[in-house]
Amino acid sequence: MWVRSAGPGDSWNLLTEPIGYLESCFSAKIGTPRQPSVCSHSRACLKIRKSIFNNPEHSLMGLEEFSHVWILFVFHKNGHLNYKAKVQPPRLNGAKTGVFSTRSPHRPNAIGLTLAKLEKVEGGAVYLSGIDMIHGTPVLDIKPYIADYDSPQNLREQNDRHRPGAAARSDGTANSCDLLLPSGCEKAQPCHSTKEKPKCPADGTSEENSQKSRDTSEIQHTLPDGRESAVALALEPSRGESMDTAEDQLGPQQLKSFLEEGTDRPGKGEGALVLRGSSADTQWDASCRARTADRVACSVVPGWVKEAPVAPLQVRFTPHAEMDLRRFSSRDAGQTSFKYFHSAEEAKGAIEDMLSADPRSVYRRKLCEDRLFFFTVDTAHVTCWFGDGFAEVVRIKLASEPVQVADPEESLVALGT
Ligand SMILES: C[S@@+](CC[C@H](N)C(=O)[O-])C[C@H]1O[C@@H](n2cnc3c(N)ncnc32)[C@H](O)[C@@H]1O
């Protein structure tokens, strides 16, 4: 795949090659969760291609030490390649915002980013859950999730050290320390401004770098002409980075303990949380701290990200649908006929999770309220309809083959027809 990128007076192309194609429990875009957090039972498997690494299992060595991974992928089923500067995310319920302030699949480079739970690594395959990608999605990369690098909350202490007299922001945007305070708690001073670039530790080790060099030469050796420079270009920025982080001295297990200790350290990151407007030395009220401990994340987000356009829907199943589900699990002498779900209960729970989050587009929600809604998950083809504050599942059939819906609106069928 060619990814276009252009800078001022400069234009270059980067040739990428998927490291694998996702085997996912979702066969079509419709009904697939919008974010991985929606459905923790959604499962997938990624097998690293031998054309990328002769011994795929080598590339996954050590990954099993991590609980979560970032998956970078291509929205290959976007259907059209045009994209717009402003889009209408479902949570804005029809209002527009800039594409880069959203997670819309329709963007200049159709790259997706998902934080998935790592279930296990087996040979050259990675088993994931909590995913929002469809079957066949080309995956470009896997990276371990490291809270100390990837979560603003974990950068707070370090950041505050560099900004001892950090003042409240005057640009009107809300810092989540302010935004997420429960009522009754005083406003805390912002922990940091996102406009100030956090000082991050170098993200790699010398060993990692030399591994990268080895991998690069491996790729350069095996790939066709023209690919070599593109791959080298991709790795260029990490060469020669200074490697003075704690990980230099730690193995994977020790690194994990190190990160866990860092997260649990008493008092970590509390330095900036002093009351505004009260005596200078007043400490952050202990009860407020307890109530906000798991909610204070020092990042800035617009309010609409937190506010769903509709309350979670109540999900119910008609007696017919319940019977369908029972038939599913009693198929083949008591064996469940699901491929990804472990039981009918899990499938039911997943369907509830998906529908409770209202998977309909704004268009459907507003203009096609009375239409049946279909989606396929695992081997189940689910038919449901939506009413005021609820979704009702009316049929669950065995999907004979993965459903490919070219245009979601094409699958609309008037209720009762
Ligand atoms: C809103 S995107 C978010 C994906 C990712 N978490 C992100 O933020 O980049 C998720 C939606 O993309 C769609 N989708 C998933 N895989 C896709 C693919 N391979 N091609 C096109 N659309 C896809 C599904 O409809 C899913 O609900």
Image (tube, rainbow, N blue to C red):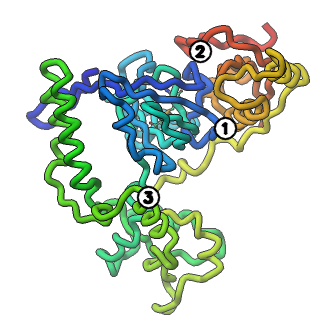
Quarter occupied by residue 31: top right
Which of these two is toward me, 378 or 64? 64
Image: 46 above or below 28: below
The N terminus - image quarter: top left
Q: Disc 1 to disc 3, how far (Cα)?
A: 37 Å
Residue 415 % position (x, y) = 78, 14
Residue 362 image point, x, y percent: 59, 29
**Residue at the left extreme of this rendering:** 9
Say which amino acid is labelled 2.
Glu
Q: Residue 17: image x %, image y %?
A: 29, 24
Residue visible at 32% across and 61% down in the picture: 247
**Residue 8 appearing in the image:** yes
N-terminal-most mark, 2 or 1: 1
User: Which of these two is toward me, 371 or 105?
Assistant: 105
Residue 357 is labelled as 1
Q: SS of the residue at dot 1?
A: loop
Task: Kindly identify the residue that appears in the image at 80 percent across and 23 percent down.
Answer: 329
Q: Residue beneath label 3, please?
A: 253
- Element at label 2: helix
| Other residues around mark 3 within 10 Å, as few (<14) / some (14–19) / many (≥20) | few
Query: Disc 2 marks which residue?
Result: 409
